[in-house]
Every structure is written in C-alpha cells, then in structure tokens.
C-alpha cells in the first residue's frame, strides 16, 4: 500500500453539498471521491502535456502537414467521397 499524505484546500459550500450527496449515495467517504477526481484530473493533464510535447517534437523535426491539405480534408467531412487523413 502506498503511503498517503494529508492535503487540505478550500471548496465552496455548493461543492461541499454535492460532495456530501455523492458520498452518501455511493457509501464512500469524501476522501475517496476527491482522490478519484484528482487521479482523473492528473491523468488527463499528463496525457495533454505528453501530446503537446510530442507535437512540438514533430514540428521541431519538420514533420508537418500543410494547411491546404488539412483544409481540404476537413471540407470533405460528411460528403460521399470523404478524403483520407492527410499524411
């Protein structure tokens, strides 16, 4: 089991009420829900940062797709002969 550390922060009265309702409905305590929410937030942010960094690396290596190709592809969405993803 991983050691945990206490952390405190402020929430609004509305958030507290919603958290308490959720805790009661799920028979889980506040800390459990807050930890799950933080896990999800941190994973989402890490994913975004990784993809932004990968995109910057691609740009640095000249791996780009021209604006015209992307525009043509997007314009074709929803039509009978939709274009393949540009490469």
Image (cartoon, grey):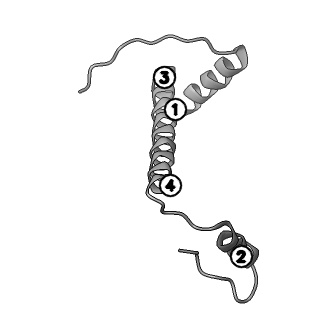
Find numbered disc 1 in the image and state the secondary structure of the residue it sits on.
helix
Q: Residue 29, which numbered label?
A: 3
- Distance of label 3 from label 4 (alpha carbons): 46 Å
Residue positioned 48% across, 63% down in the render? 63
Residue 37 shown left or right of residue 20 in the figure:
left
Label 3 packing within 10 angstroms: few (<14), some (14-19), many (20+): few
Q: Please name whichever residue, 36 or 61, is drawn nearer the observer in this view of the structure.
A: 61
Q: Residue 72, which numbered label?
A: 2
State which quadrant residue 18 falls in.
top right
- Distance of label 2 from label 4 (alpha carbons): 21 Å
* Residue at numbered disc 4: 59
Label 2 packing within 10 angstroms: few (<14), some (14-19), many (20+): few
Answer whether labels 3 and 4 touch (C-beta < 8 Å): no
Of badges 2 and 4, the one in the foreground is: 4
Does 66 sit above or below residue 82? above
Q: Residue 37, which numbered label?
A: 1
Residue positioned 51% across, 44% down in the render? 48
Of badges 1 and 4, the one in the foreground is: 4
| Among numbered discs 1 and 4, the one appearing first in the sequence | 1
Of badges 3 and 1, the one in the foreground is: 1
| Among numbered discs 2 and 4, the one appearing first in the sequence | 4
- Distance of label 3 from label 1 (alpha carbons): 13 Å
Where is residue 71? Give x, y as percent. 72, 70
Answer whether labels 3 and 1 touch (C-beta < 8 Å): no
Where is residue 20? Give x, y as percent. 61, 21
Residue positioned 45% across, 27% down in the render? 35
| Among numbered discs 2 and 1, the one appearing first in the sequence | 1
Residue positioned 49% across, 49% down in the render? 56
**Farthest bottom residue in view:** 81
Where is residue 6? Give x, y as percent. 40, 11
- Distance of label 3 from label 2 (alpha carbons): 52 Å
| Among numbered discs 3 and 4, the one appearing first in the sequence | 3
């Amino acid at each position: 089991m991983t050691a945990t550390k206490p952390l405190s922060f402020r929430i609004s009265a509305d958030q507290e009420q919603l958290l308490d309702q959720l805790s009661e409905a799920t028979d889980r305590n506040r800390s459990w829900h807050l930890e799950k929410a933080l896990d999800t937030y941190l994973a989402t942010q890490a994913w975004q940062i990784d993809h932004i960094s990968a995109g910057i690396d691609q740009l640095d290596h000249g791996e780009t797709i021209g604006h015209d190709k992307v525009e043509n592809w997007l314009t074709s969405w929803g039509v009978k002969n939709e274009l393949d993803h540009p490469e």
